[in-house]
Image (cartoon, grey):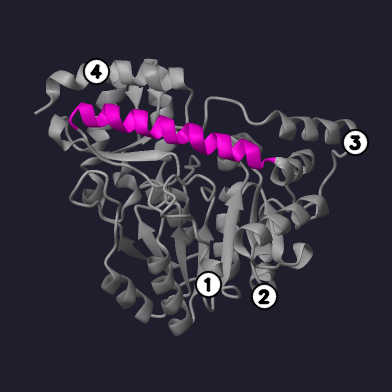
Amino acid sequence: MPFKPAVADRLAPFGTTIFAEMTRLAMEHGAVNLAQGFPDFDGPELAKQAAIEAIRAGRNQYARMPGDPVLNAAIARKWRRDSGLEVNPDAHVTVTSGCTEAIPAAILGLVNPGERVVLFEPYYDSYRACVSMAGAIPEFITLRPSSSDEGPFTFDPDQLRAAMRGRPKAIILNTPHNPTGKVFSREELALVASLCVEHDVIAITDEVYSELVYNPALPHVSLATMPGMADRTVTLNSLGKSFSLTGWKIGWAIASEPLTRAVRAAHQFLTFATCTPMQLGAARILTEGDAYVRELVASYTIKRDFLAAALRDLGLKVHVPDGSYFIMADHSSLGMGDDVEFCRRLTREVKVAAIPPSVFYDDPSNGRSLARFAFCKQDRTLRQAVDRLQALRHRRA
């Protein structure tokens, strides 16, 4: 009898990621790719030079499992400066192969089969898959778009309170948020923190866009800095978004010793160690890269506003993000189907690729009217995309 390969039940429902599908479609049709969230320009020379120096110096073997001491120390210094919290770089910092590995390391290390995990949706698709791999049960809190242009996505505090009364093992919080661009306010974080303390819930926070915030009145705040949260929060971050080095896959988890032991229990069997010379390049740019980040944020602010204005001019309802490098827009006025059909047609007919976000919801109907556009691109790329999008002008209601 012939062997029939089969995907395990825990992963079969997820199929191929939407990012891979839309990137393949963009390449097939020669579309400008505003779907996948990576820059089409290079990162800082300082980081690259430090990695090259490490390679030439023979730093090409396994790093220690929790991370090269130089990088762990650089992460701890940056965390102290940004958050005001003191951590031991050897006991509280774990270097991972991107935040994409830190997410399953945290979930698999902390959550048992059958335990519940609260997720805000729309969610980065890795969260839902990792919860499934852990055999845990997800519970969703829906972020809903405001009724007006420019308005942020919001959630129902009572829905969160009800979910937390069920005493889940963990809650996953992403701020600044992908895909909505929401920056959770201090008041919202205070509510999350008080519920975590009241119901003894661990928080796993994905803060990879922490540097990419655009509204001075709404700065990024780490949940770990809220009362009672320093010892019950695993803070995840990475190099890729802040320094335009997504292919380096350098991430980290910061947590108290008991939570760090759990993260490392999984990390050692996922990748064990992360690329040594890239860790040393990361340490250099984390230490000396403030000017690069300031310039990047200023540039992204201009790019965000340029793309938002163009989409609005075409009749889309635009939710201007306070953080990240994505814009969510309501395309329903164009009459081109739901989000999946809209993004496929946009790629095939207009030659611009975007992401249909319904795949990031437990109930896909919540995202049917939306599309996600990435603005982390060169100016000429964005101009080309906007020029092509003019083909939609005749569809405006």
Residue 245: which quarter of the image? top right
Earlier along the polypeptide chain: callout 1 or callout 3?
Answer: 3
Mark carried by residue 210:
none
Q: Is 392 positioned to the left or the right of 382 in the image?
A: left
Q: Are marks 3 and 2 in contact (CB under 8 Å)?
A: no
| Whole-number angstrom distance, CA of label 2 to CA of label 4 | 55 Å
166 or 333: which is nearer to us? 333
Mark 2, other Cα within 10 Å: few <14 / some 14–19 / many ≥20 = few
Is residue 141 visible in the rendered structure shown here? Answer: yes
Q: Name the residue under label 2.
A: 258
Q: Disc 3 designates what residue?
A: 58
In the orientation shown, which residue stands out farthest toward the bottom? 198
Q: Which residue is drawn at 31% across and 52% down?
A: 361
Instruction: Identify the mark nearer the N-term, 1 or 4.
Output: 1
Circle 1: residue type: Asn
Residue located beneath label 1 in the image? 112
Q: Position of residue 178 (x, y in %)?
A: 42, 47
> Main structural element of the magenta stretch: helix, strand or loop?
helix
- Whether tag 1 and tag 3 are in contact, CB under 8 A, the answer is no
- Measured as percent of width and height from the top left, residue 316 is found at 21, 34
Q: What stretch is highlighted in magenta?
A: 289-315
